[in-house]
Image (spheres, helix red, strand yellow):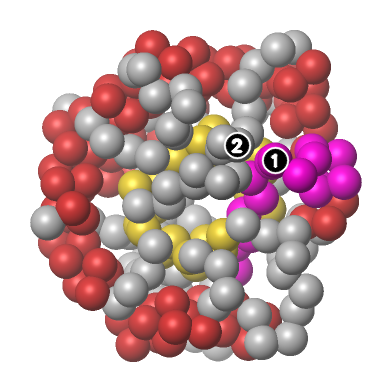
Amino acid sequence: MSMREALDLSAYLVIGPENTKGRPVKGIIRDVVAAGFTIVQVRSKVASAKELIGYCRDAAEAIAEAGRADRVALVADDRLDVVLAAREAGIKVDGIHVGQSDIPAAVCRKYLGDDAVIGLSARTRELIDYVRTADISDIDYFGAGPLHETATKPEAGRSASGRVITRSLEEIAELARVSPVPAVIGGGVKLADIPDLKRTGIAGFFVVSTVTEADDPGRAAAALTAAWRA
């Protein structure tokens, strides 16, 4: 079974070197995956291509060390070149996550193949409109939000006054209802949000600093996954 067929989006970690308080990316991923997270995205707006390939290697090794290489998907944010180069180097990167203004999903599918995992992110309201008209045959899941304002996503939608536009549970439930592919919600998600998010019917949640900047990332991750399962 390919990772695309086995995809589990319930607990999704987004991580890069700028989010770890100086701690190694690999160690945090290993602890978080051991705590039950099901998909990891390597994302950095400051790392070079070579550095990103190295982080993909670290992530793949951490997932393997946690004994989850056949169950936890690893994707890279935005950089098709990085994914292709990492694969050429023998690194198990399962796919890519792109935005609506990034390289098209169809191009990613062409170069990464039928078994690759491809995710697309957009603000929740835009996605609700998008799924009604767009060809999503190359997309495996949507990433949406933000649920709350968050420092790790400065490009989130803003009102005319500059306020970040967050998304209600009602909008998230609508997305879960109309989307033909599963969707995950992030943007400032905290432990207390998990029960309400689960009730919307969404496929999962994604987090960055709630886990990566926690004093004990593994413990923070375990609390989130336990709340989701409950």
Q: Is residue 118 magenta?
A: yes
SS label for mark 2: loop
- Judge from the rendering whether residue 54 lies leftward or rightward of residue 194; answer left or right: right
Q: Is residue 36 above or below residue 60?
A: below
SS label for mark 1: loop
Residue drawn at x 75%, y 29% is: 82
**Mark 1, residues whose alpha carbon is within 10 Å: few (<14), some, or many (≥20)?**
some
In the image, the segment drawn in magenta is 108-122
Say if residue 76 shows up in the picture. no
- Judge from the rendering whether residue 111 lies leftward or rightward of residue 72; answer left or right: right
Q: Position of residue 221 (x, y in %)?
A: 23, 38
Residue placed under numbered mark 1 in the picture:
115
Q: Is residue 146 above or below residue 125?
A: above
Three-letter amino acid code of the residue under disc 1: Asp
- Judge from the rendering whether residue 129 lies leftward or rightward of residue 73; answer left or right: right
Residue drawn at x 74%, y 65% is: 137
Q: Quadrant of the N terminus?
A: top right
Three-letter amino acid code of the residue under disc 2: Ser
Q: Position of residue 45 (x, y in %)?
A: 62, 39
Residue placed under numbered mark 2 in the picture:
2
